[in-house]
Amino acid sequence: MIEYDEVERRMVLKLVYYGPALSGKTTNLLRLHDFLETEGRGDLMVLDTKDDRTIFFDLLPFFLEAPSGLKIKVKVYTVPGQVRHDATRKAVLQRADGVAFIADSQLAESTNNFGSFDNLEKNLSLVGLDIDEMPLVIQFNKRDLHEIIPEADIKRVWSPTGIALFMASALEGWGVAETFGGLLGRTYDRVDKRFSLSREHGLDRQTFLEKLTRRAGEAVTGKRLR
Amino acid sequence: MDKEHRSGNFSYVVGAEKGLRDLLAGAETMPLLEGAVEAGVLSAAITDSKGGVVWSAGCPGEKTYAETAPISVEGELVGRIMVTVGTEAEVGSYLKGLLHILSVATNMIIRANLKRVLTTETHATVVNRSYEELVETNRRLTVSEGKYRELAATLEKKVEERTGELKRAQEGMLRREKMASIGQLAAGLAHEINNPMGYVSSNIRTLKKYVWRMGTIMDFYRSLIEGPAVHDAIRRQAREKWKELKLDVVSGDMNDLIDQCLDGSDRVRKIVSDLQAFAHVEDGTEVPVNINREIDRTLDVISHQVPEGTEVVREYSPLPAFTCNPALICQVFLNIILNSLQSGSEKPRIFLTTSCEDDLIAVSISDNGNGIPADIRNRIFDPFFTTKEVGKGTGMGLSVVYEIVTAYGGTIEVKSEPGEGATFLLKLPAGRRPNVKVF
């Protein structure tokens, strides 16, 4: 569902942070906003929240230009996690080009994680997207807490699905950029396959990732699990 | 690349790309630009990403000094703010400061507008979708309410219908039970009567032969006595004895008596055979038959009993095969047709039709007789019920018909108006196996 305008030489990629309520989707975006260089990065737009709960969505936009002159805008959205805001989730998920599922590592939240993942599958199919084709990563957030699912258990459950897994603590700030990088890489691969970013536009994977995940000060080295 | 992408014409529910003109309005920017001119610059303007002027205030002179600041939407440069002054001396902290104020204010307006647009879009989308869902829910509820209303309205009627069905089923069951007990009785009676009747009837026939022989020899003796070789005194004595014993009457009456005995025993045999047919509906082998052909066969069998001048009209439709004992089904038609022939019409007319719908074979047999009075119409299928004179009918004909038809899972109805004949309507299910349950 990549939006590509050949005349204007513009491409818009839509990435969505999905997950159960209070799993830390907005915190992920806040951290990215803090970490990453301001050049080419728009401001984080946090739409009206009530008691720190997202009811619309958050938006963190990025902008870059390929050597060919192709303008690429990457818009990273969060969805409201609460069950009651399903209509908003569907609206935001429409035409998504990649999804990061932010799960809550706390033991008590397992059911909510599965419920939200089911909801993701259902809504993707409702808006006409195929989850098997969708660039998808899963982040287990809140690894700084105590009562959490052991990493080994997570791997045992999720590894067979082939979906990339990331451990993170958005609150402490680690694992966030890696998750984002993982999602960007998968999204790049899909876009490259279809629009030959590397061959026709001179934008290789490495450059794409570096431009979007350049930290103020240091380069991101993705520590990926699996 | 498909057409959709080539045209670049994308529709987003939420978050469609917004340009400079979507997010800034003249009413918002002009006061800022005019304020800058009032503050002392020659001109202030906002240009788009290609350098074209969108809004401007003041008038740049021949020789001016310009400074610009970027305007961005979501990190992308979408235009610039440009202010000009007339002297190089003014290009200092004064111009930079003014430009900074304009830049911060413009970008802030853009961010606020973008936020408002996104919020409104989401809100509108969610409200629309919720409304559509509510409308759909309402539609489903209306349909379901309609169903319940209809159900409530027809409930009474349905209960009445079911009650009627139950009542009819119960009556049928009672009737079958009655028939079953009568059938057992009949079967026992038939067996007990058959044995003595066998030799009674056979002996009477033999007796008739013997009586004929005796009569013959008597006639021979009488002719001898009346002849010339016999003495007058003997002839007189013989005549007196003949007279005394009333042998004139006896010889005339004897044959009638014996014939009546034979008639009587034949009738007893017939009653017994009817009783047996009644009691043994299940007997015999069942084969698929064509009902039309069975009716024809029945008519052939009774051809000698059909009065001269009787009109028989047949209107047959092609029928599926019906599995039954042919003798029994012929018995059904025989009994009904014989009844029709005796229905009292001067110019008898029998009207036979067959048809089939949904594997249900319908046979209708009508006559133009006197009809069946309403008060006895529901008794005609009862065993031993007859309207004929005592000794003329057995009262078994139509009850045998009823038992056979119901044994094959069929139904029989009679319609009649006094003086306008009677119609027997039989319905036989061709599809399913006969529901034989009799005796």
Image (cartoon, coloured by chain):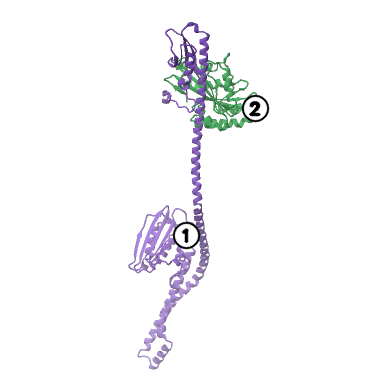
Dot 1 amino acid type: Thr
Residue A93 makes an appearance in the image: no
Q: Is residue B104 left or right of residue B337?
A: right
Taking the view exactly as shown, the residue that stands out farthest to the right is A146
Q: Position of residue B119 (x, y in %)?
A: 52, 27
Asked which secondary structure carries label 1, the reply is helix
Asked which secondary structure carries label 2, the reply is loop
Q: Chain of mark 2?
A: A
Rendered green, the chain in question is A
Colour of chain B as rendered: purple
Taking the view exactly as shown, the residue that stands out farthest to the front is B38
Front residue of B248 and B52: B52
Cα distance between the residues tagged 1 and 2: 77 Å
Q: Which residue is mark 2?
A: A148
Have a look at marks 1 and 2 and say if they share a chain. no
Q: Which residue is mark 1?
A: B406
Give above or below for B266 relative to A113: below
Dot 2 amino acid type: Ile
Q: Identify the image quadrant of the C terminus of chain A.
A: top right
Q: Position of residue B140 (x, y in %)?
A: 49, 41
Front residue of B293 and B311: B311
Q: Residues within 10 Å of mark 1 (few under 14, many from 20)?
A: many
**What residue do we see at 44% from left, 21% from top?**
A5
Q: Is residue B177 left or right of residue B321?
A: right
Residue B101 makes an appearance in the image: yes
Name the mark nearer the viewer: 1 or 2: 2
- Quadrant in the rendering for residue B308: bottom left
Q: Chain of mark 1?
A: B
Give above or below for B95 relative to B274: above
Q: Position of residue A119 (x, y in %)?
A: 55, 32
